[in-house]
Image (cartoon, rainbow, N blue to C red):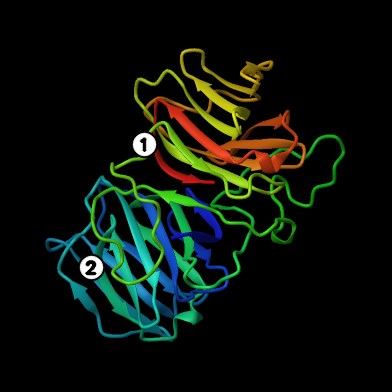
Amino acid sequence: MAFFSTQAPYVNPAIPFSGIIQGGLQEGLQITIQGTVLASVNRITVNFQTGFSENDIAFHFNPRFEDGGYVVCNTKQRGHWGPEERKMQMPFQKGRPFELSFLVQRSEFKVMVNKNFFVQYSHRVPYHLVDTIAVSGSLKLSFITFQRSSAVPVQPVFSTVQFSQPIQFPRNPRGRNSKLQGIRPAHQAPVAQTVIHTVHTAPGPMFPTPGIQPVAYPTSAYPVPFFTSIPNGLYPSKTIIVAGIVLPNAKRFHINLRSGMDIAFHLNPRFNEKVVVRNTQINNTWGPEERNLLGKMPFSCGQSFSVWILCESHCFKVSVDGQHLCDYVHRLKHLPDINNLEVAGDVQLSHVQA
């Protein structure tokens, strides 16, 4: 089943976090939170609410680790809580990564933890009133993604990528006038499908009713080497996100944007040389390498990373963990032909958006 990104993900947001749900909640929308529970955790809270005041919360999802662990679900209207619904089970583990998904259905929310169905919560107020998600507690967030099944008709929305601290790109050289550094407004991007793959940390059934079904892999992480298509190829304002963990004894890894047998953009961190090599391969022949960086090597062995590649009309702009890394001027000019992504080397992947 095909699925679409309804808005760009929030990447590495700081806790506590509040963010807009563009267009509000709609039937068939799945919101997925990926992160890690801290060892010192006491409570975690996810609120689907109206605005930022917390006076009107349609769905309050509140894992509590005291008394053996349980989860409270509730609704707050005009500042007043309703009756609690409790599930005396704790699906999260201290110090461990998790994936938490909420599927909006006509009569209820369905909640999955690590791909296993956990609970459903009947709507007490109209879900379309919700326009904000808020997350707090003792956890570290990696991503919050928004997806819809193609079974529910919707016009895909393209927006600027949202970061807790906006990605920092230098101003466009060559005298070009850019309204926003490193991003494009939605109306400039053609409508296209965005495929988001997410880690399956545990086997289990998907939602028992039709909904979004991310691509499943048989292991707890992506297979590496990892290959996926880029629907409709690249175009100005198209973004690619790759996130994961560098293996402790890593020597190198690479991210390739391919055009047939050619490699339009080769991003290659080499830990033995402490350098990030960029290059293009045409007809099995490499061009001149680009190695210079303004700052230090942004990748570290044993550490997590998120790479964000923005395709512009004349170059790729690359950031790592929200900080601008480099520009790479296109050597293969026909962007729609750049339609495959490859990741290989000494990494474990946690999230890919292409």
Can you tell which of label 2 and label 1 is closer to the viewer?
Answer: 1
Within 10 Å of disc 1 (Cα), the crowding (few <14, some 14-19, many 20+) is: some
Q: Position of residue 40 (x, y in %)?
A: 25, 49
Write the residue at 69% across / 60% down: 186
Q: Position of residue 309 (x, y in %)?
A: 60, 40
Q: Nearer the viewer, residue 235 or 43?
A: 235
Q: Farthest residue toward the right?
A: 175
Pointer 1: what residue?
Answer: 223
Q: Earlier in the sequence, mark 2 or mark 1?
A: 2
Within 10 Å of disc 2 (Cα), the crowding (few <14, some 14-19, many 20+) is: many
Q: Position of residue 101 (x, y in %)?
A: 36, 62
The reply to whether residue 311 is in sight is: no
Q: Farthest residue toward the top?
A: 273
- Secondary structure state at the residue bearing disc 1: loop
Q: Which mark is residue 335?
A: none
Q: Position of residue 58 (x, y in %)?
A: 40, 79
Write the residue at 51% across / 52% down: 195
Write the residue at 61% across / 25% down: 295
Quadrant position of the N terminus in the picture: bottom left
Pointer 2: what residue?
Answer: 71
Instruction: Please indicate whether residue 263 sits to the left or right of residue 254 in the image.
Output: right
